[in-house]
Amino acid sequence: MFIDTHSHLYDEAFDADLDEAFARMVAAGVANCIFPGIDMASFDRQSRVAAQYGGIVHEAIGLHPTSVGANWRDELDFVKERLLQRNSPGATNPYVAVGEIGVDGYWSKEFLREQKMAFAEQILLAREYGLPVIVHVRDAIDQVFEVLDELCLKDLKGVFHAYSGSYETYCRLRTYGDIKIGIGGVVTYKNAGVAKVIERVPLEDILLETDSPWLTPVPYRGKRNESAYIPVIAQKVAQIKGCSVEEVAGVTTANAKELFGI
């Protein structure tokens, strides 16, 4: 059994064959997937699809760094309101994480300061609710470390998704708490640097993810990604680690269940 810990199956790229995509996912042995939150604009679509496939989908809520703009305070208030609704004592169907949050210096640096502020506030929000974080970082690892150092964290729980950093960066991240790294389709690419990192990272610190519909693994690269391709990623991880696919499935699934409480 597998868990896709980062999937955007609610994206409009799946409008034409959503039922079929979920059927292929289950047939491939992927029992659950986690939908990360992005912003207010995508919230209704995410919630609708998650409700449609209840029992299979678990949701996170958060403000994605590339959605941080002039109205970022309104966006953060929205995240806080939804957490209060679904993660207060006695509420049902709680969010399993705060995310996707982080810092992105690739697409735009215009609101980089605000991104760091939103990242810090959402980390504290996650701690308030006892939730892990799902972290996005691209061309901004120094800014991420600045935020984590300023918060003086030693008990952070979460995953750095679509991990592309070095082994040394992984080791530093582990000093902030129980940090996993999310491994997806990129690991199957020729000369992927993350493959060398995985050789040294314990399987107990790895989660499997697709980030569908993006970052499609080989041999499907160039096509839309989907959660049904998790076993392809698991096979590559098993090859790198010199173990069986069954071991990768068992350990990474246990990792996901423990981190997200599912």
Image (cartoon, rainbow, N blue to C red):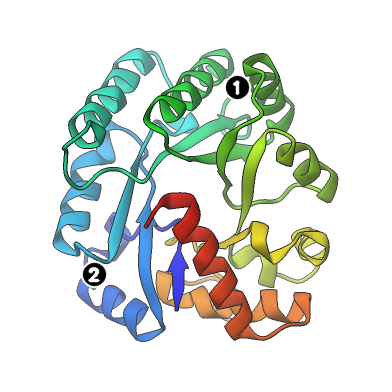
Residue 244 can be seen, yes or no: yes
Secondary structure beneath dot 2 equals helix
Residue 262 lies left or right of residue 205; in this view the side is: left
Residue 143 lies left or right of residue 22; in this view the side is: right
Q: Residues within 10 Å of mark 1 (few under 14, many from 20)?
A: some
In space, the residues marked 1 and 2 are separated at their CA atoms by: 35 Å
Question: Which amino acid, mark 1?
Answer: Lys
Dots 1, 2 in contact, CB < 8 A? no
Residue 76 spot, x, y in % from top left = 34, 21
> Looking at the rendering, which quadrant does residue 136 occupy?
top right
Q: Which mark, by number, is residue 18?
A: 2
> Looking at the rendering, which quadrant does residue 75 occupy?
top left
Residue behind mark 1? 109
- Quadrant housing the N terminus: bottom left
Q: Residues within 10 Å of mark 2 (few under 14, many from 20)?
A: some
Residue drawn at the location 76% of the way across and 71% of the way down: 190
